[in-house]
Each structure stands twice: as C-alpha cells, then as structure tokens.
C-alpha cells in the first residue's frame, strides 16, 4: 500500500513543499518504507527529494526550502512488489515529452505485457521493477504520440484513456506536467482510492489530491470529492479544473480492506466514514460471537489489539454488554532491533511492541479482537501473551473474514502458503494460534457494514477473502511471480525502519551546504 498526494497553490510565490510534507505525514500509515516529493518551480524546472525511511527522516527544513515552486507531487511507499532501494522511491520522472512527474498507489497484473510493449514497440527504457515507471511511460508514450509542441487537456485525457485501455490492476495516480498543472486519476474499477479538495486563498483557489480525505482536512481544504472509477481530473496552473469520465459504465469495486485496516478512521472514502464502518464491523462481529459461542457464552472481558481494532472492539463489547478493557499497551516509539553477533533475538517483535497487563487478564476468559489475521504469527504471540498474563480462556476474534488469497492490487500480503487460513479450517487455525476458539467476521457481514453507508456501492474488491479478482482472472504464473518477488526479503517491514543514511536522489534549487 502507498499514499499519494499532489498540490497546486494559486499564489505562484508560495511553496508547495511544506504542505506536501504535512500531507505525507498524514499518510505515513500507508507506507513507512520510503518517501518523496517533487515540486515544479515557476520556470518549469523540477526539484526532487526522495529517500528511504519515514517522512520525518527523509525531509528536514533545509531540504524542504530547496524544493521550490507552488505545485508538487508526494508519495509514501510500502513496497508491494519490487525492491527497497531508494532508486525506486516515487515520484518518478521522465523528461520527454514535456517533463512529467508521476506517483501511484496500487499494482498492475499485466506488468510483463506492458514491459514488453514499452521495450519492443515504444522503445522506452524501464529501469526498475516499479509499476509506477510502467504507468508513467505508457502515459508519456501516449502524449508523445500527439507530436505536439504544447498539449492541452484533451490530449491528456486521451493519454489517460490510453492507460485505462491497456493497464490492468488497481491504481490511483497523481501526476504533474512541467509548467502545466497537476492531474489525478483512478483505475476503471476504482479499486484504490484518491480524491481532491479545494481551498480559497487570496490569489484564487488551491487544489489538493490525496489518497485519503484526512490529508485535505488536515490542510484545511474542503469539499473533498472522490474520483470515480475511470475518471481523471486536471487542474492547470491557472486553476482551471476539468473532470472527465473516460470509461463508460465502469464496474465500481473499491477495495474493502481500506475500511478494515488501511485507512485512517477519520477518513471518508467514497462517502463512507471509515470510523462508522468499523463500528458497524464491531456490531456484526458481536453477531458472530453469539452465533459461534451462544448467548450463554463465558466471556468476561473484551480486549482489542491496538490500534486499528479498538473502534470495532468497543462496539462489539457494547452490543454484547461485556466489559471492554485495554489490556495490551503499545509502545509507540519502537524502532529497529539490534542483535549482536552470537546473541539470539530474545524478545519477539510483538513483545517489543505490546505489553499485556496481567491485571486485565488474570483469571479471566478474554475475547481478543484484532482487525485481521494474516500470517497468524502475531496472533500466536498475542494469545501466548494473554495466557502468560494469566488468562483462563482466550478467544480470538477477527473483524475481517479469514484471508485465504493473495492480493494483486497493491496490498502487501504474504504468499498463499504463509497465510494462516490458507487451506485450514477454523479449528485448525485456533490450534495454530493457540486460542480456545477463533471467530471470523463473515464476508457478507463485512460488506453490509460498509454498504449501509453508501448504497450505491454493491461490488467490492474482496479478493483476499473470496479469491475473486475484479479485473479478470489472475494467472497462476503471475501469482508465482509475485510470490517470488516478495519472498526475496525485498519487502519492507513496519518494524525494521530503513536507515536514514541510505538517503539519495536529491535535486535541489541550490547547492546545499
Ligand atoms: C457513494 O459512492 C459513490 C462513488 O464514489 C459516490 O459517487 C457517491 O457520492 C457516494 N454516496 C454518498 C451518499 O456519499
């Protein structure tokens, strides 16, 4: 998963970089592996700074001051497929035609085909494993074909339509064309989110695109609107806004996992408050608890695994009329682990992150609520911690259904055989994680929890739960390819922050001292 944003300020004398930085900080939960900002100065020159690490590690005041210009694009990365090197940090840039900067969130399922086309037909060199580079080069190639000295909105829309025609997968994108303006678009199924908002200023209207509405809220923008599936929006330097639906009758199927886990609770995506929908998931989960354990269950206390599942767990407790308690305390300042040669890692990562308070567990039958169960390794540790803290019975409930299939639209999921629920029954999963029982949300309950807030959405990308891929069948060959990319240890890890000294790729306005 990644986070994207783009900003255009009406006042040409202001700088976009400080607010892009703020915006990326608000998107940090979507990717902690790398961050980048590219701005465009008044003379049409781009200034970039990107590197591996958290947003606050990549940028500082002197760097932001060198990123001049009143428009720009920002990105935070959580690698899905590809490597961890800073050369693959987004945004990406191509010089021809016109100078384009591009950032995206998502994943393409026909990357091989596109790579071949770019090489053999378009003669464009692709230097990384990133899908962003593919999308950007398809876009650039389409614009190039106009053969024009200066382009207009029509040319850009045509170029984006060209992307929709050939690129299969989930992708939400922002782009910037030197001296022209900023652009946002969303794949024909609207799998990944992106919206835009505006703000009045002395010199006119400012515009901002972002993966989540919370970014626009945080920067005092209003009237946030989601892009529709297959839609593109162009905002020119003169603040002319043009929207165009480029795909007729698209099947809207947004990713349901955004609501379960990825998005911030204070975001509203496609008209659905993530917070409200998590409350509804908690209620639906309460129904499952009764269904599985009966009305005369013996649960004494409900305890969430912080932070995501808190909202839902509270509502489950409320509906079941069971005490809700915070039994796991999270260390918010956890960083990298250092292991000295010859010493084994004594504490598992989970134990560095959470501590179980025995006063909430001792002698009690607890229902632990988590947002989802992926590999089951964390769950296993959590259950063991509850037992060590003196719990009598440990039930584990998941706000999401069992994850049995890989994700091909940009969510970083392990390969199939690493998924705890792959080919296992509920009892087998319970045995694996060491719980007395596991209780999963039903997919219908999850869907209903989201749909009740926007009746116009009736289909979802819920492929990790049901194995149905909305963009059409995903080949076994592709799944194996994806798994091999992820198996190489290429994937970022939340707990192992990349070291800031790998910072690279800066192109500043002035030489830095
Ligand atoms: C529901 O979602 C669609 C698609 O994003 C959007 O057009 C519509 O405005 C939303 N409805 C509400 C009530 O927000």
Image (cartoon, rainbow, N blue to C red):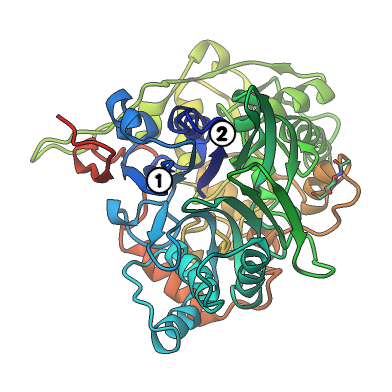
Q: Image check: 482 left or right of 399? A: left
Classify 132 as above or below 330: below
Which of the labelled discs sits on residue 9, or is there none? 2
Q: Nearer the viewer, residue 458 or 187?
A: 187
Q: Residue at (71%, 69%) from the top-left corner?
A: 470
Res 368 visible: no
Residue 19 coordinates in the image, percent (x, y): 50, 28
Numbered marks: total: 2
On-image quarter of the C terminus: top left
Q: Is residue 172 visible?
A: yes
- State the SS at label 2: loop
According to the picture, the residue beneath numbered tag 1 turns out to be 43
Give the class, few, some or many, for how many residues have Cα within 10 Å of label 1's Cα (few <14, many ≥20): few
Residue 62 image point, x, y percent: 28, 26
Image vertical order of residue 161 relative to residue 48, above or below = below
Classed neighbour count for the residue bearing mark 2: other residues with Cα under 10 Å, few (<14), some (14–19), many (≥20): many
- Alpha carbon separation for disc pair 2 and 1: 15 Å
373 lies left or right of 269: left
Mark 1 beta carbon near ligand 1 (under 8 Å): no
**128 in relation to 496, above or below:** below
């Amino acid at each position: 998963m990644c986070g994207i944003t783009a900003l255009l300020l009406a006042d040409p004398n202001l700088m976009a970089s400080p607010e892009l930085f703020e915006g990326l900080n608000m998107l940090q939960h979507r990717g902690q592996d790398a961050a980048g900002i590219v701005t465009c100065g008044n003379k049409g020159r781009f200034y970039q700074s990107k590197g591996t690490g958290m947003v606050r590690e990549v940028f500082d005041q002197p760097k932001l001051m060198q990123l001049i210009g009143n428009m720009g694009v920002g990105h935070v990365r959580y690698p899905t497929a590809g490597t961890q090197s800073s050369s693959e940090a987004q945004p990406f840039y191509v010089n021809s035609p016109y100078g384009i900067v591009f950032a995206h969130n998502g994943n393409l399922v026909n990357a091989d085909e596109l790579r071949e086309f770019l090489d053999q037909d378009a003669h464009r060199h692709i230097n990384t494993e990133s899908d962003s580079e593919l999308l950007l080069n398809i876009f650039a190639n389409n614009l190039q074909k106009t053969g024009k000295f200066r382009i207009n909105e029509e040319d850009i829309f045509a170029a984006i339509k060209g992307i929709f025609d050939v690129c299969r997968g989930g992708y939400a994108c922002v782009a910037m064309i030197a001296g022209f303006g900023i652009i946002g678009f969303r794949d024909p199924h609207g799998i990944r989110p992106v919206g835009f908002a505006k703000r009045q200023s002395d010199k006119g209207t400012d515009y901002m695109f972002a993966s989540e509405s919370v970014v626009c809220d945080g920067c005092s923008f209003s009237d946030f609107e989601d892009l529709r599936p297959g839609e593109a929006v162009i905002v020119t330097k003169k603040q002319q806004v043009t929207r165009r639906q480029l795909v007729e009758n698209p099947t809207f199927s947004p990713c349901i996992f955004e609501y379960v886990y990825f998005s911030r609770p204070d975001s509203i995506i496609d008209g659905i408050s993530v917070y409200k929908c998590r409350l509804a998931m908690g209620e639906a989960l309460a129904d499952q608890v009764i269904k599985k354990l009966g009305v005369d269950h013996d649960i004494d206390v409900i305890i969430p695994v912080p932070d995501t599942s808190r909202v839902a767990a509270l509502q489950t407790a409320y509906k079941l009329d069971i005490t809700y308690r915070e039994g796991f305390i999270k260390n918010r300042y956890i960083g990298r682990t250092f292991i000295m040669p010859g010493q084994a890692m004594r504490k598992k990562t989970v134990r560095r992150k959470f501590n179980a308070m025995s006063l909430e567990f001792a002698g009690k039958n607890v229902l632990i609520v988590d947002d989802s169960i992926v590999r089951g390794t964390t769950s296993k540790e959590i259950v063991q911690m509850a037992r060590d803290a003196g719990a009598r019975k440990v039930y584990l409930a998941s706000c999401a259904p069992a994850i049995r299939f890989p994700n091909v639209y940009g969510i970083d999921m392990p390969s199939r055989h690493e998924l705890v629920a792959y080919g296992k029954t509920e009892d087998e999963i319970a045995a694996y994680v060491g719980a007395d029982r596991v209780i999963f949300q039903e997919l219908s309950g999850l869907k209903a929890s989201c749909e009740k807030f926007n009746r116009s959405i009736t289909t979802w990308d819920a492929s990790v739960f049901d194995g149905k891929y909305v963009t059409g069948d995903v080949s076994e060959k592709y799944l194996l390819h994806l798994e091999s990319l992820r198996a190489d240890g290429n994937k970022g890890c939340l707990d192992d922050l990349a070291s800031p000294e790998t910072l690279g790729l800066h192109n500043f306005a002035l030489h830095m001292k």
